[in-house]
Amino acid sequence: MASAWDRAKEMAEKHSGSGMFLRLTNDGDRVVGVFCGDPDPREMHWNGEIYEECTGQACNHCAAGKKPSLRVAINFWLAAENAVKVLEGGTMWFRDVLAVRDKYGLDKWTFEVKRIGKANDPKTRYSILPEERIEPALRVRIDACPLHDLASLGRGDAYEAPEQPGTGTVDDATAKALLGELRALPRPEVEKFFAAFKIGRLRELKAVDVPEVRAYLAHAAGDSTIPF
Ligand SMILES: [Zn+2]
C-alpha cells in the first residue's frame, strides 16, 4: 500500500519534472543505459539559476547581448530502473554522444555516462563509454518502454550552468604572475592592455587568452621607452 509520503513524493516529482530528468550533479555520478530516439536541440539562456528558452527575434536575453547555449535532450533508457528518462547536456557532451554514435552505434550498445567535475564547476565534462552490447532480449525490454515526447517538454529546470570550454577565467597563480609583469609597464601601456583584451580587471581574463597576453606583454615591455 502506497503511503501518503510516497504519494506526496510522486506528486512533487511530477510537478517539478525532476523525476523525468536524469541528473548527474556530483563528481563521479554515473548512469548506465541506452540512448533512444532522436535528440531535441534547443538554444537556451542561462540566467544564473535556470535555463530560459531563447525565443529568437523577440528574445530579451539576445537583445541584452547574451549568447544562447545549445542544450540537447535525448531519451535515455536507464538500466537500473528499466525506464526511460531524459538526459540533457551541452555542446561538448553532445559532440561526445555523436562520436560514440559513429563509432559504436547508439542502438547497439549500452553506455556509461559519467560526470567528471564537481557541482557547479563550469569545466565539468562527461565521459561516455560503451558498457556492453545490447542482446536481443534486452532490446525487447528497452523497446517496451515508452519514450518521452521531448518537443513538448519544458526544459527550464535543467540543472547546471553552461559548460565553458576554454572560456574559464585565468587561475590565481597566472593572474598574479601577469600582475607582476603589468606593474613593470607604464600606466598608459597598462590601460592599452586592458582595452586590447576588453577586460576591466585581470581576473576577468580568459584562460585561453593567456598565450596571447604573454606575447602582448613581451612586445609591450620591449617597446616601452616611457620612463616611470
Ligand atoms: Zn535569445
Image: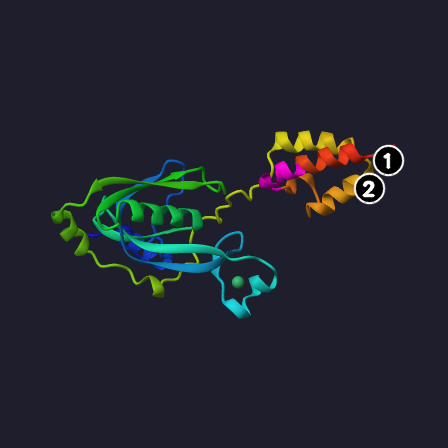
Residue 188, disc: 2
Q: Nearer the viewer, residue 211 or 167?
A: 211
Q: Amino acid at mark 1?
A: Ile
Q: x, y (%) of residue 171? A: 59, 34
Q: Nearer the viewer, residue 75 or 82?
A: 75
| Tag 1 and tag 2, C-beta contact below 8 Å | yes
Query: Can see residue 3?
Result: no
> Is the CB of the residue bearing disc 2 within 8 angstroms of ligand 1?
no
The residue at which mark 1 appears reads as 226
In the image, is 109 to the left or to the right of 185? left
Query: Over which residues does the magenta segment extend?
Result: 206-213
Q: Nearer the viewer, residue 61 or 167?
A: 167
Q: Distance of mark 1 from mark 2, alpha carbons?
A: 9 Å
Q: Is residue 212 magenta?
A: yes
The kind of secondary structure the magenta stretch mainly shows is helix
In the image, is 124 to the left or to the right of 86? right
Q: Which is more foreground, mark 1 or mark 2? A: 1
Q: Amino acid at mark 2?
A: Pro
Q: Residue at x 39, y 62 (%)?
A: 154
Examine the rendered structure and indicate whether residue 91 appears above or below residue 65: above
Residue 173, disc: none
**Of marks 1 and 2, which one's residue comes earlier in the chain?**
2
Q: Residue at x 78, y 43 (%)?
A: 191
Colour mapping = rainbow
Figure quadrant of residue 70: bottom left
Q: Is residue 194 magenta?
A: no
